[in-house]
Image (tube, grey):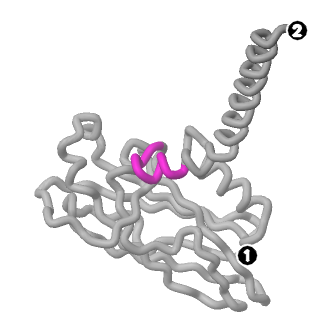
Amino acid sequence: MDKNQHDKNTKTLLSVFGVVFLMIALSFASVPLYNLFCKVTGFAGTTQLSQSLPDTILDRTMTVQFTTDVNKNLPWTFKADQANVTLKIGQDALINFVAKNKSNKAVAGTAVYNVTPPKAGKYFHKTQCFCFDHQILQPHQSMNMPVVFYIDPSIAGDPNMEDVKVITLSYSFFKSDSSELDEAVDIFYNSDTK
């Protein structure tokens, strides 16, 4: 084999290994990159986390409904103190949820959430939330779990959001360290339909 043919084969082999390496690296990075994309854009109902409130409060109001669910393997009750709240866009709201352990032993739970319609996620900002935190309730203990949020005033400039009058914030509690929680978190982070 001549030197030119050997050099071409070497370049081809290195190119193939480079492409394979790149594909493997992208497969490992895809979930974190997708999560970052969802958090930045609000894609698929992912809400935003904020450290401060907006400077503007609009006259336009929106209703936020609250729904709750508890997995059958978690011996808790969990509900919002109120079914919904109507607030001005840009105004913050504090909503209290109450969880109660109905069992005779300490049990840990973790909540996942979503917002519908999904397109509203990028405008729904939480400044305080218990979601994804490991919560431990002692036997028959009740715990208040507040959520503070606002709807970003930039929603008013999005023509795709003109039809949205109601946003639903849903929480589901699962027993911590359970396969059900793992599946719910996997769906939360990897589903295009959450």
Q: Quadrant of the N terminus?
A: top right
Q: x%, y% of residue 99?
A: 58, 79
Residue at the farthest left position: 59
Side (left or right) of 77 relative to 42: right
- Give left or right: position of 123 versus 19: left
Task: Using residue 65 as the reference point, say whether residue 181 is left or right of it.
Answer: right
Residue 148 to residue 106: above or below: above
Q: Residue at x 70, y 79 (%)?
A: 108
Three-letter code for the amino acid on which mark 1 is drawn = Pro
Decide: few, some or many residues near mark 1? Use Cα within 10 Å; few <14, some 14-19, many ≥20: many
Name which quarter of the figure residue 185 lies in.
bottom right
For residue 33, which numbered disc appears in the image? Answer: none
Residue 81 locus on image (x, y percent): 43, 75
Residue extending farthest right: 1
Between the C-alphas of marks 2 and 1, the distance is 73 Å
For residue 129, side relative to residue 122 (left or right):
right
Query: Height in image: 129 above or below 122?
Result: below
Q: Pick whichever of labels 2 and 1 is earlier in the sequence.
A: 2
Tell us which disc is closer to us: 2 or 1.
2
To which residue does mark 1 refer? 75
Quarter of the image where the C terminus is located:
top right
- The residue at the point 28 percent across, 40 percent down is 161
Task: Specify start and end residues of the magenta stretch as a single range.
Answer: 35-43
Which SS type dominates the magenta stretch?
helix
Q: Amino acid at mark 2?
A: Met
Q: Disc 2 on helix, strand or loop?
A: loop
Name the residue tied to disc 2: 1
Q: Please check the rendered image and state whether residue 37 is part of the magenta-colored stretch, yes or no.
A: yes
Across and down, in percent, residue 181 comes to 71, 62
Q: Residues within 10 Å of mark 2 (few under 14, many from 20)?
A: few
